Image (spheres, grey):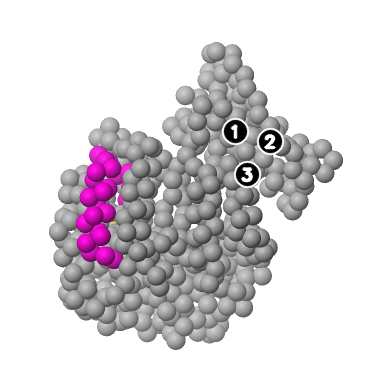
Amino acid sequence: MLIVLLSAERDLAVTGQDVVRLFYPDSDIVLQPAVDYEIMLNVSASRLGKTLTGSASLKNRDTGLTEEASTDAIPVAGDERNQQKRLVKLALFRLLCRYQGTAPGPWGILTGIRPTKIVHRLLDLAWEPPEINEYLINSYDMAPGKAALLTGIALKQRPFLPAKDQAKKLVSIYVGIPFCPTRCAYCSFPSYSVETRGGMVESFLKALKGEIEKIGAALTEQGKKVQTIYIGGGTPTVLDTQGLRALLANVRTRLVGDETSEVTLEAGRPDTVTEEKLKAALEYGVTRLSINPQAMNRHTLLKIGRRHTPEQVVESIEMARRFGFGNINMDIIIGLPGESEKDVDNTLREISKIRPENLTVHTLAVKRASKIKEDKEYFHLPSWDQVEKMLEIAAEGARGMGMEPYYLYRQKRMVGPQENIGYARNGFDCIYNIQIIDERQTVIGLGGGAGSKFVDPETWRLTSHYNSKDPETYITRIDDLIARKISMLQGNSGLKLKGLS
Ligand code: SF4
């Protein structure tokens, strides 16, 4: 279906696109007049004295039906253009809800991926939680349950958010290992199968070693300390013992300091976990392990291209417990192909027996680069309603293990407009996850495809930088990548470095 979305001011039409996509995820949306459209939408924002209003109208070309909606007028306050954009979204959302007879999920017009940031901004302004809930419900058309969830999570995170002076001194580090045993059907991460790209691992590790050393030295020079480290990917434990040992030793020597309170190692695929690798992890100060089943159902694991079994998940976690790891996270995905509520219930029952300290519940996002996107027929996905029920089963399971939600983010193209939630038992909240989502601390990404976010504590503004995804390009460009990051760390975000593009 072709949808035309127009506005006299193009940026308002651009803003409205995300809302239209909530209702029509598979349709083509164009921002200029077209002849063979099915629905034409028009949006505008107007100012009358000191108040603003958003409006939207709809025309169905075949039936001739027209509809209109406007928001209540609100007083101009703060950034007027941002207010106008929100009002346009709200008018469009209400119009399409009426036209379709239903709302597309519980998040209203909130399409951003870090909604807790809104709550933190309001908490900074000393708003009370009930006021914030009311604002989220009325200004974003969010369901009351989601508003309460969001506010509750933000309040739980407050003690971990750095104040301005701390944000000047403390950073977190992400280390990306872009290799996996095989590629999962849903994967959109910068990851390459060792079966096809294994020959590059050694030179990749050499480049990464240099990057860790030089960034470590730059941090010391500037008097900055590392609070948390997250070694992810990819699957870091796909490295052989020697490679993993050398990496962890380098991280320990160059990055870990007296302020480092958390070092996470993703051992994403249980079939890559061995006693020797766990021994190395313990020896070099890993405090948190993430072993990710995604589902505890053999048929699902086969379908999504993971070669391990549910039994291997249990074995690898038992092994980690024997070695003394007391903080284990497990990731699961809701909405996997062919899964029903019964399957999710089984996954949660199996995980409850293992009793991890953290459970991260993702909703499947169907990204462009994934096999699922390419073959929708084969990968039959559950409906939005089913996904909602499955998320409730997961939340119930987490509560049953004594966990509470402590971080939340959303993604584009989820199966159902839902969210990803991290649950933790008391005292086991992953501080890195909070810092990366709430963006109040500089996070430096090292390795393949790793993103860096440099935070200006005076304004909480961000400057981003991304390492090359492809290991070969990463290796070739390593000196440029390091130089640029060191420069950004010194606060030269806008500076064009000589010889760098
Ligand atoms: S384990 Fe993770 S990074 Fe590796 S292929 Fe699967 S989804 Fe991608």
Q: Residue at x 19, y 66 (%)?
A: 316
Q: Are marks 2 and 1 in contact (CB under 8 Å)?
A: yes
Residue highlighted by disc 1: 94
Question: Which amino acid type is marked by label 3?
Answer: Asn
On whether residue 372 falls in the magenta region, the answer is: no
Mark 2 vs 1, N-terminal side = 2
| Alpha carbon separation for disc pair 3 and 2 | 11 Å
Q: Is residue 168 above or below residue 149?
A: below
Q: Earlier in the sequence, mark 1 or mark 3?
A: 1
Q: Residues within 10 Å of mark 1 (few under 14, many from 20)?
A: many
Q: Nearer the viewer, residue 364 or 393?
A: 393
- Residue 433 lies, in percent from the top left, at 44, 65
* x and y, in percent, of residue 282 in the image: 27, 80
Q: Which residues are magenta?
A: 333-356
Tell me which residue sits at (47%, 24%) in the image: 1
Residue 268 in view, yes or no: no
Secondary structure state at the residue bearing disc 1: helix
Residue occupied by mark 3: 138
Residue type pointed to by label 1: Arg
Viewer-side residue, 367 vs 164: 164
Gap in angstroms between the C-alphas marked 1 and 3: 12 Å
Identified at 31% across, 62% down, the residue is 401
Q: Is residue 353 highlighted in magenta? A: yes
- Label disc, if present, on residue 256 of the rendered structure: none
